[in-house]
Structure formats: structure tokens, C-alpha cells
Amino acid sequence: MTAALLSLTLRGLLNRRRTLLLGLIGALILLVAVIYRLSGPAEAEASTFTGRLLADFGLGVLLPLVAVIVGTAAIGSELDDGTILYLLAKPIPRMLIVAIKLLVAAGVVTVLVALPILLAGIIGTGGSASLGLAYAVAAAFGALEYTAVFLALSLVTSRALVIGLAYVVVWEGVVAGLFAGTRIFSVRQHALAVGDALAGDGAVTAELAAGSALLIGFAVTLLAFGLAVRRLERVELRGDSN
């Protein structure tokens, strides 16, 4: 049953239209890196520009956008079409269902985001993999936290995609940029802190220490996971998500 659930979740997330859309989004950062490299930049400036590209576009735009699309669809799509009730009728622990959904969705987000970030880092720096690898690891960390939050959100409301996009645009894009005290609640800042610590190039100055970002990020992930399990148990009892 576990293998079947893994396979069904992966196929559900990677339907043709969604895969094409997410692939095109990931290709944008590669396009920018290629254009920059073709402009013949000075090697001294390449690391700084590439670091900003990977942080601002990779972790700031690409990661949350892919995560909100994939995370809200991991269980949300089954809630919308009612097929979740067939899954809940099986003798599978609800915690295991949520864990599999979360790990598969986070894995998909990691591949779709971390791989383009790694390749863009190599292209932008002219062959060095260290900068891209640092931000790829940060993207993997952020992917797990973002996906957990958006997956839980999809079990709380049927408007998870809209609310998730509002969080990304309003909170992380505006509020966290204006008020330093709110950045502790920004998943983007958690990922940036990890990337900045691993890269060590000074291109990005994260607002949080890497240790604090890791601690808060894992705490948020666990809380979101627990909420998702609890909400899924209520779906079983009531036959809906409300």
C-alpha cells in the first residue's frame, strides 16, 4: 500500500499540464543565467550576481511558487474531487498518508527547484558548483517547510492556493521586507539563512542566523505536519474537510 500510495501521489502531482508549467518556471532562472554569461561579465562580479540571482529569484520566487502549486495539490486535489474518501477507507494510518504525501511533494519541489538553481549557479559562475550547491541545499530545506505548510493549508481551507499565493506575495514579498521583526516567520528567510551560511560569499546577507533558521524551520514543519494529520482525521470522521 505504501508503494502504491507513493506512485499514485507522484503521478497525481506530475500530470502533463502541471509538469510543463513548473518546468517552464524553472527554466527561467537558467535563461537568466545563460543571458548573463553570454554578456561576458568580469569573473570578479560573476559570483556576486549569481548569488543574488539564486537568492532573490531562486529562493524568493521560484521556490515558493512551485511549492504552493505542488503543496496545495498533494492532498487538496483529492479533497476537491472526493477521491480522498476512497483512500481513507483503506487501513492506512493517517500519519503515514500525510508523511508520504509530504515527502513526495517536497521531493518533487526539490527536484524542480534545486536542480535549476544548481545548474544556474554553475552557468552563472562559469563552471563552479559550490555556490549553486549551497543554494540548492537551501532550496531543499525550504521545499520541505513550504510544502508542509501548504499541504496543511489545503486541509484547512478549499482556497489554499489563493491564500498560499497571498502569503508568498504579501507577507514574504512585502511585509517581511519592510519589518525586520516579521522575518522570523518567513520561510524564505529561513532558506536564505541556510544558503547564505553554506555559500559564505557575502552576496546575500540573511536576516537570521542559520542555526535559528534551521530550528524554526523544522519546528514549523513539524507543527504543520501535526495539523495536517489532525485535519485528515476529521475528514475521515465527517466525510469532508470542514
Image (cartoon, rainbow, N blue to C red):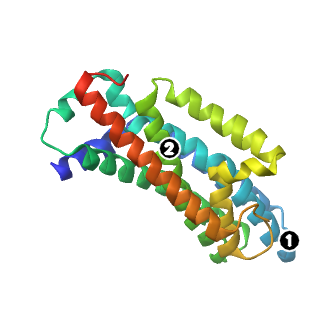
Q: Secondary structure at mark 1?
A: helix
Q: Position of residue 24 (x, y in %)?
A: 57, 43
Packing grade of label 1 (10 A; few <14, some 14-19, many >=20) is few
The image shows residue 173, relative to residue 58, as above or below, that is above
Which residue is found at the position 39% from the left and 46% from the top? 226
Q: Secondary structure at mark 2?
A: helix
Q: Quadrant of residue 211?
A: bottom right
Q: Is residue 51 left or right of residue 153?
A: right
Q: Who is closer to the viewer here, 19 or 88?
A: 88
Q: Who is closer to the viewer here, 55 or 212?
A: 212
Amino acid residing under circle 2:
Val
Residue behind mark 1: 45
The answer, for residue 121, to whether it is visible in the render is no
Q: Who is closer to the viewer here, 39 or 155?
A: 155
The answer, for residue 177, to whether it is visible in the render is yes
Q: How many marks?
A: 2
The image shows residue 86, relative to residue 173, as above or below, that is above
Q: Nearer the viewer, mark 1 or mark 2?
A: 2
Q: Position of residue 237 (x, y in %)?
A: 23, 27
Q: Is residue 139 left or right of residue 61?
A: left
Which residue is found at the position 49% from the left and 40% from the top? 150
Residue behind mark 2: 149
Amino acid residing under circle 1:
Glu
Q: Is residue 164 left or right of residue 144?
A: right
In whole angstroms, how far apart are the C-alphas of marks 1 and 2?
A: 36 Å
N-term-proximal mark, 1 vs 2: 1
Q: Looking at the rendered structure, which numbered label has been put on residue 75?
A: none
Which residue is found at the position 38% from the left and 22% from the top? 242
Which residue is found at the position 42% from the left and 35% from the top? 73
